[in-house]
Image (tube, grey):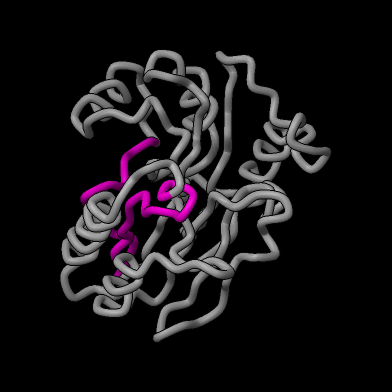
Amino acid sequence: MALYAIGDLHLGFSVDKPMDIFGPGWAGHVQRLEAAFSQLQADDVTVLCGDTSWGMDLEQCLEDFQFIDALPGKKLLLKGNHDYWWNTASKMKRFFEENDLTTLDILHNNCHFYGDYALCGTRGWFFEEEKGGHNEKMRAREALRLEASLKAGGDRPKLAFLHYPPLYEGYQCREILEVLEREKPALCCYGHLHGPSHRRALQGTRFGTEFKLVAADYLCFQPVRLL
């Protein structure tokens, strides 16, 4: 059994959203994901750090979910800024059950346990959303969600997962970082950054937490093994 993470699969089997328009690095990305996941085992767990599907609702995402469900191992889904299909946890879980998507679950306002570890997470917030007219209320809300998820882990060692980077060259989400500093997860994985933005990602250990970019194109579409 092993734990992996990857974000930003950007699947779109039911929508006209080819990813290779964003550059040659995305060419054949679905096939590359399938080949990489084929190396995983049935008892492995992969955290998907947001932007999973371009579908606008759950029904439009069904083919994408079926593709993910058929890959080896269990998958925990976070919300990303392009996951417009995201709904209440009860509706998503019911949709998974009704469509026999047995390897999918949600990581949002909750936590999951992997051995001795608590897996915790939320979407987070980013400066580009501030430019869109959002305010500190949303940053505070996401910080509360992250705190609730981390506290649900009790006394276990914790790993945190976000979609948005809490640290970026020239930017930091102070509310999210304050929660991470208090709760001190050993690791914080995040996605969202693509192409030239990769070089502005801030990684490495800060205040006791290791920060790691896991966007799919940064990982060359290979889930990174964490444990």
Q: Residue furthest right?
A: 24
Say which quarter of the image contains residue 78.
Answer: top left
Q: Which residues are magenta?
A: 104-130
**Front position in the image: 211 or 5:** 211
Residue 176 appears at what percent x and percent y? 32, 65
Number of on-image labels: 0
Residue 161 appears at what percent x and percent y? 40, 58
> Is 125 placed left or right of 68 in the picture?
left
**Front position in the image: 15 or 225:** 15
> Is 150 placed left or right of 41 in the picture?
left
Q: Residue at x 50, y 35 (%)?
A: 52
Q: Residue at x 33, y 60 (%)?
A: 119
**Front position in the image: 95 or 183:** 183
Residue 66 appears at what percent x and percent y? 49, 23
Residue 204 appears at what percent x and percent y? 56, 78
Say which quarter of the image contains residue 22.
Answer: top right
Q: Residue at x 45, y 14 (%)?
A: 60
| Vertical relation: 166 (above or below) 130 | below
**Front position in the image: 216 or 225:** 216
